[in-house]
Amino acid sequence: MNNNVYTRRANYYETDMMGIVHHSNHIRYFEEARLFFMNNIDCNAREMESQGIIIPNVDAYARYHTPIRFDEEIEITVTLKKFTGAVMEFGYEARLKSNGKLAAEGHTKHCFVDKSFNPMSLKRKYPDYYAKLKENVTITD
Amino acid sequence: MNNNVYTRRANYYETDMMGIVHHSNHIRYFEEARLFFMNNIDCNAREMESQGIIIPNVDAYARYHTPIRFDEEIEITVTLKKFTGAVMEFGYEARLKSNGKLAAEGHTKHCFVDKSFNPMSLKRKYPDYYAKLKENVTITD
Amino acid sequence: MNNNVYTRRANYYETDMMGIVHHSNHIRYFEEARLFFMNNIDCNAREMESQGIIIPNVDAYARYHTPIRFDEEIEITVTLKKFTGAVMEFGYEARLKSNGKLAAEGHTKHCFVDKSFNPMSLKRKYPDYYAKLKENVTITD
Amino acid sequence: MNNNVYTRRANYYETDMMGIVHHSNHIRYFEEARLFFMNNIDCNAREMESQGIIIPNVDAYARYHTPIRFDEEIEITVTLKKFTGAVMEFGYEARLKSNGKLAAEGHTKHCFVDKSFNPMSLKRKYPDYYAKLKENVTITD
């Protein structure tokens, strides 16, 4: 399986009274997909955080296409679009597995800080993580 | 008090292991602020939905500036930036009440659909709601 | 695999500033495990709800033993402890997969109502679901 | 106003496809009410935690009576039922403000630990907090 395709099912408690997954949860799905992908490229967020690397969101965007309903399987494709050592950007595409329809797409930007929320240079302090992320940036043209 | 300034406190369960409010919750805060404002201009979402007007998100964006910590009071200013009858756009500015610091800003776009998620013309079917929203669009230039 | 053992990983956004999964999320994990099990015994909650069978909680209890941390795999064993046609009760045992430690245990009680929240007799109106649930009650003595 | 009566409105994102507040959220409402009450008796959880006093849940129980719908105002009465210095227990009663109907009731048990989750004696290390909690236990007979 592709290391950047994350699959999960929509939970009952994620729906709202509209009968569909509440739009805030897509942001959470994106996080799950992102951390799954990072783990697959040897950048496990739990280990990184235990070493003092905190990776907060700088921003988050989601655009909603097809509503996701309870119990539907969703396939999220993550792309590391940009990585400078100071910031990184991911793109997301969430599709309903049953019919391939685009459920949502989005992007998030992140920075690297220490436990006191001071900016950190991943390149200088953690060259291994730096290298892993660098080599997994998707080349688009 | 201004009808578009919504105040609330950050809850414990909204924080994550970073020690700050998880970034997905800002999208929920925006929703709270938006529905508060809509209620203040006689567009109560609960009544609208009970009349068959469903208002899903078309998109949502948040940009994070200062982390919000548990128990901090947040003041969110909502602006209805655009309303065409078919779609509407809101802008948000969330500030820490203690020091006025910008915590986050963002925007969301919405459409109007019926219970089967078919597009609906608010202007034709619900002229009163249409008028209320129309007159509360913030004129910016 | 056993049809009543549900496995999932703890998500980042489910942690709180204590650094562990917030205690409200265990109630959600229980729901995931319960609906997984029900699906496995041909009582898919989505189909049941689309046929007009709503299954609200009458109560919910969780007792917390070992904290669950981000990224840990959890194995939840569900047991249908009681089913009368009018109410049903489930028991849950959540263990950390890495070491088998008990993370939490709990139970929930449910009833069956129609879309207007009026009590419904599953036995009379939906004998197939009734039979499925009946035969999957765990005999304990 | 009574220092143990907490009021809040049900948010849209707290509802589920049943059209009512998802049962896991009552556990969160209880937390809000508990921390509101603790703050009112000079036991602010944020300050306590910053001094190294972590107060995890030992258990949590909710029994659901009347469904809570979006936008409904809820009034939660909190009672500190027991406090030994090592553990404390709270009771909760959530009522719909519009008609006084009981929406849910419940209880939670808590202990006191340090940042490494080792048990801590509040009485010996933090006599002031100990005294505040002690004097706010509700005498029932």
Image: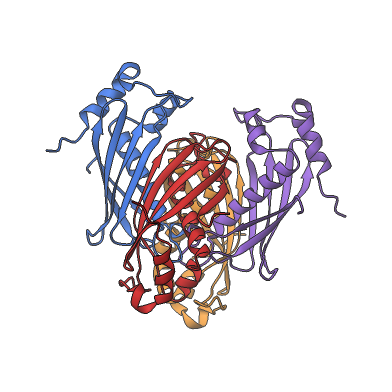
Chain colours: A red, B blue, C purple, D orange
Q: Is residue D48 above or below residue B75?
A: below
In this orientation, does residue A28 appear? Answer: yes
C38 or D89, which lies in front? C38
In the rendered image, the residue lying farthest to the top is B124
- Of the 4 image quadrants, the one containing the C terminus of chain D is bottom right
Q: How many marks?
A: 0
In the displayed structure image, the side of residue A87 where residue A66 appears, left or right: right
In the rendered image, the residue lying farthest to the right is C141
Toward which corner of the image does residue A13 lie, by quadrant?
A: top right
In the displayed structure image, the side of residue A60 where residue D75 appears, left or right: right
B35 or A21, which lies in front? A21
Could you say where residue C102 lies in the image, as x and y percent from the top left? 68, 66
In the rendered image, the residue lying farthest to the left is B141
In the displayed structure image, the side of residue C58 where residue A34 appears, left or right: left
Could you say where residue D56 lies in the image, as x and y percent from the top left? 54, 67
B58 or C132, which lies in front? B58
Q: Is residue D133 above or below residue D33?
A: below
Question: What residue lies at 32% left-to-right and 44% top-to-bottom?
Answer: B33
Could you say where residue B50 lies in the image, as x and y percent from the top left? 45, 26
D128 or A89, which lies in front? A89
In the displayed structure image, the side of residue B139 where residue B36 appears, left or right: right
Question: What residue lies at 54% left-to-right and 44% top-to-bottom?
Answer: A74
Question: What residue lies at 67% left-to-right and 65% top-to-bottom?
Answer: C97
In this orientation, does residue D10 appear? Answer: no
In the rendered image, the residue lying farthest to the bottom is D124
Q: Is residue B110 above or below residue D23?
A: above
